[in-house]
Image: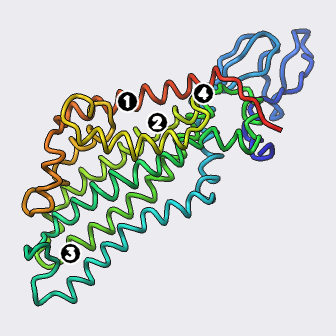
């Protein structure tokens, strides 16, 4: 970890002092022959912020976040969690292949049927997006990645290397959060597109007609990963057992509250995601009608977008604030 952070240290090196030959004051030689102002002279350097007099320069929040993002992205892509993520997103792909296999075996009887009623391709794809992606894959990945953004650094005892650099503490979490978002989006979205191609290319399906719904589903999945990730980033920074807290929220709180009529469902992320993809629960067959009866109340799209932005923004701000103020004690 110390070697990997050399890119951050490179911005804090001190240039040599070169004496003036014309009787003036000393200047700094940047090594390339150009002269810059002597120490003590205020200068504005893009991306670098000076601390107290005599202190080392400190990267700004965004510049430091980009550096942490670059370091964390490679770690996440080659971590064991990537294998877990591949297994999670591989489940819907296997199910889509199974549906195509059933179509081939039962082609003479009208393909996939439930209680003697043929299930349309749009209904199958909508149910898979809602059940397998929005209600399972997205929150599960957010739990395992979001709660570990800071917990892994504490467990590996590498957090001291990050906090000893002249960067804002909040930038550590922000950079790792951005790396999580890029990593998960790069794996989940291709899986959704492959499922779309497999299901909507069935006999009776239409890839062109369902493309607008696909675009809405992709946007909803990206927003879900962003908002759930921000929520669980705060959980990981605030609580001592963040993984258990996150799993309880995903598999206990949200499913139970969504089934209870009233205002409590407004305290879930899934309620607002549901408002973005009402087409995921069509009413043209009995199974979809059953799900739609359970989730028949959903907010308008503008309301959903507004509240998702509020939940994600506030959660990420709280997570950064918690990391900036919390004292981390490493166990021996």
First along the sequence among labels 1 and 4: 4
Quick check: marks 2 and 1 in contact, CB under 8 Å? yes
Q: Which residue is mark 3?
A: 201
Q: Nearer the viewer, residue 149 or 53?
A: 149
Give me the residue at 15% from left, 39% from top: 297
Give me the residue at 66% from left, 24% from top: 48
Nearer to us: label 1 or label 4: 1
Give me the residue at 31% from left, 68% from top: 195
Nearer to us: label 2 or label 3: 2
Q: Can residue 10 be seen in this snapshot?
A: no
For the residues labelled 1 and 4, the Cα–Cα distance comes to: 18 Å
Left or right, residue 273 beside residue 253: left
Measured as percent of width and height from the top left, residue 298 is found at: 17, 39
Residue 311: image tag: 1
Q: Nearer the viewer, residue 131 or 197?
A: 131
Residue 230: image tag: 2
Q: Which residue is mark 4?
A: 170
Q: Residues within 10 Å of mark 2 (few under 14, many from 20)?
A: many
Residue 253: image tag: none
Secondary structure under the numbered disc 1 in the rendered image: helix
For the residues labelled 2 and 1, the Cα–Cα distance comes to: 8 Å
Secondary structure under the numbered disc 4 in the rendered image: helix
Measured as percent of width and height from the top left, residue 165 is found at: 75, 30
């Amino acid at each position: 970890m110390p070697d990997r952070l050399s890119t951050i240290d490179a911005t804090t090196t001190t240039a040599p002092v070169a004496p003036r030959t014309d009787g003036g004051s000393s200047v700094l030689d940047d090594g390339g022959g150009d002269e810059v102002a002597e120490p003590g002279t205020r200068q504005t350097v893009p991306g670098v912020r000076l601390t107290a007099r005599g202190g080392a320069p400190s990267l700004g929040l965004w510049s430091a976040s980009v550096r942490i993002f670059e370091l964390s992205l490679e770690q996440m892509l080659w971590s064991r969690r990537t294998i877990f993520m591949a297994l999670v997103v591989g489940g819907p792909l296997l199910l889509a292949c199974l549906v195509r296999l059933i179509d081939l075996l039962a082609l003479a009887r009208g393909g996939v049927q439930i209680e003697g009623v043929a299930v349309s391709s749009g209904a199958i794809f909508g149910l898979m997006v809602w059940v397998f992606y929005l209600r399972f894959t997205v929150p599960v990945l957010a739990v395992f990645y979001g709660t570990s953004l800071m917990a892994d650094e504490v467990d590996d005892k590498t957090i001291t290397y990050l906090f000893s650099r002249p960067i804002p503490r909040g930038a550590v979490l922000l950079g790792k959060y951005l790396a999580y978002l890029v990593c998960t989006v790069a794996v989940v979205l291709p899986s959704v597109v492959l499922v779309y191609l497999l299901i909507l290319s069935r006999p009776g399906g239409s890839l062109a007609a369902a493309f607008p719904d696909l675009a809405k589903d992709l946007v909803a999945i990206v927003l879900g990963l962003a908002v759930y990730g921000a929520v669980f980033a705060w959980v990981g920074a605030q609580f001592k057992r963040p993984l258990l807290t996150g799993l309880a929220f995903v598999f206990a709180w949200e499913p139970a509250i969504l089934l209870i009529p009233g205002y409590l469902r407004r305290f879930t992320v899934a309620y607002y995601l549901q408002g973005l993809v009402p087409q995921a629960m069509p009413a043209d067959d009995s199974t979809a009608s059953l799900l739609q009866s359970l989730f028949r109340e959903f907010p308008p799209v503008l309301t959903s977008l507004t509240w998702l932005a509020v939940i994600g923004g506030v959660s990420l701000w709280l997570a950064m604030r918690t990391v900036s103020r919390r004292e981390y004690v490493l166990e021996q």
